[in-house]
Image (cartoon, helix red, strand yellow):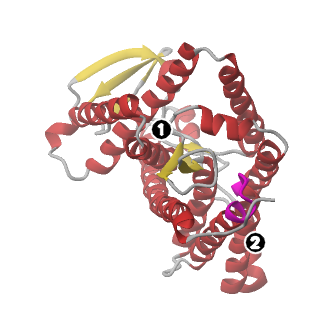
Amino acid sequence: MPEKTISVRTLIPYLLLEILAVAIAYYGSWISVWAYRSMKKRAEDAREEASEQTSDSESEESAQSPEGLTSDGNVNVMSKKDAMMLPVTGSAMLFGLYLLKKLGKQYVELAVMAAFTLYGVYAMANQIVFHGQAWVPAALLRPVLTLSVPEWLLSSFTAPITGCDTPNSLRAKQRKGRAAVCVTPIFLAGLVFGGLTGWWFWTTRGWLPNNLIAVCFCFDCFRSLLLPSFPIGALMLGGLFFYDIYWVFFTKVMVAVARGFDIPLKLVIPNSASFSSSAVAMLGLGDILIPGIFLAFTLRYDESRGAKHHPIFRASFLSYILALCATIGALVFFRASQPALLYISPFLIVGSSLGAFLTGGVRGALAFWKAHET
């Protein structure tokens, strides 16, 4: 039986991972709030435009959705079906990567690494645009190049897309199965910076460029994906709770993929004192994105109620921190990989519900459980 001696040096990399994960989830929640506000503004502008075109009733109906919050070109809203399919699609992707790794072909691994690295570069460019629009000169927001591409190609990405008449990095206007894509100087600058970071990662496989790309990937997901209600969030967390347990405890697939591919879908901290066979401590982005999307919903819910101190978000955020501590404690004690969502999912569901109850009693909890963003 392995000795259970725990040193401070052993814990430091995992504590750094937790601090980084918590910081990403916190800031990502605010990114989600800003994206939601922008989405609401676009919806209001669409309704105003539709009301002016009184002769076009179909346009007015499309601008006013009876189901409330819906996806547009900039943001995708998670549906109940999406939440139910997450464990299935996640399992398919995970096992597919595992099979590719088993092929043992170097060119296959390089192709997979290149695909994820390029998407990470694209996400980094998006974040430079998202955060830089309010600070750069207007000239950098004007299109310098317009391309016509198939709609299906454009829908494969999560770039800020609205129309060629508004200042975003990539923007589209539907034209009979094709889209007009407008490229701005700030997006080109973002691509250059992202490309240099991607090249740095590709040539060194270093933990620092890996983490830079991974953080931008997280922020881009927070910007482009919204959770509209607690039931859908609970369904998402519940499904992935079992997904994580199965692939970590009952198979070697998840660990093999995480350690077998040098792709920026995990946070990595050097760990010379690691008790594992690897020289790094790592945390998959799913253990940040999934709870982060839920945390973002609680923050938007508090904002919508005008709750000054965001009590439900704070309770949920504290629950996330405690869940990560429990994960790290189990990891160090058992000296084996742990399914983080085993701890995160119940902590978040219970913690957020408790926060709603302490804030408004039974009525407050019921209102939170039934809330649906519009």
Classify residue 33 as left or right of residue 194. Answer: right
Front in this rendered view, residue 77 or 254:
254
Location of the C terminus by quadrant is bottom right
Q: Nearer the viewer, mark 1 or mark 2?
A: 2
Front in this rendered view, residue 369 or 42:
369
To which residue does mark 1 refer?
A: 54
Element at label 1: loop
- Judge the density around disc 2: few (<14), some (14-19), many (≥20) Cα neighbours within 10 Å: some
Magenta stretch contains residue 339: yes
Location of the N terminus by quadrant is bottom right
To which residue does mark 2 refer?
A: 350
Please report contact status of discs 1 and 2: CB closer than 8 Å, yes or no.
Answer: no
- Taking the spot 37% from the left edge, 33% from the top edge, the residue there is 204
Q: On screen, 249 above or below 180?
A: below
Kind of residue sitting beneath label 2: Val
Q: On screen, 280 above or below 6?
A: above
The image shows residue 235 at horizontal and vertical percentages of: 78, 53
Q: Which residues are magenta?
A: 330-340
The answer to whether residue 264 is seen in the rendering is yes
Kind of residue sitting beneath label 1: Thr
